[in-house]
Amino acid sequence: MENDKHILPPCSVSRKVVFLVARIATVMAMYAVAPLQDFTSSSDIGLSKPIPDIDRQLYAKYGLTEDEQKFIESMIKPME
């Protein structure tokens, strides 16, 4: 019986499982609308170009407005 004190009661385990399942569902829903991009040599984006050119191609491909582009540029630090 001494070892039994370390076992969680079933209701605690089920609450944790419900929380984890809800969390997984939330993350999956967030990424469900993210477009898949082909990064192979057969991509419709010229991946051999400089990063700013690739960004512009992607903005055009996904129809981002100028405001959306400015927002992204203000939030993402350029790669060095």
Image (spheres, grey):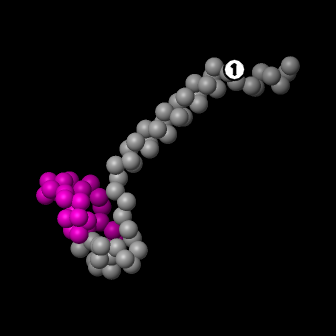
Q: Quadrant of residue 55?
A: bottom left
Residue 57 in view (yes/no): yes
Main SS of residues in magenta = helix
Span colored in magenta: 55-80
Give the residue displayed 49% in from the left and 33% down from the top: 22
Q: Quadrant of residue 53?
A: bottom left
Q: Quadrant of residue 4?
A: top right
Where is residue 72 shown, x and y percent of the image? 24, 56
Left or right: 24 in relation to 29: right
Where is residue 74 shown, x and y percent of the image? 22, 56
Give the residue displayed 69% in from the left and 20% down from the top: 9
Q: Identify the amino acid type marked 1.
A: Pro
**Residue neighbourhood size for the residue with mark 1, other residues' Cα within 10 Å, grouped as few (<14), some (14–19), many (≥20):** few
Where is residue 18 shown, x and y percent of the image? 55, 28
Left or right: 65 in relation to 18: left
In magenta stretch: residue 18: no
Q: Secondary structure at mark 1?
A: loop
Quarter of the C terminus within the rendering = bottom left
Give the residue number, with chain letter if any, for mark 1. 9
Give the residue displayed 33% in from the left and 76% down from the top: 47
Residue 52 in view (yes/no): no
Give the residue displayed 19% in from the left and 59% down from the top: 63
In magenta stretch: residue 74: yes
Where is residue 7 shown, x and y percent of the image? 74, 25
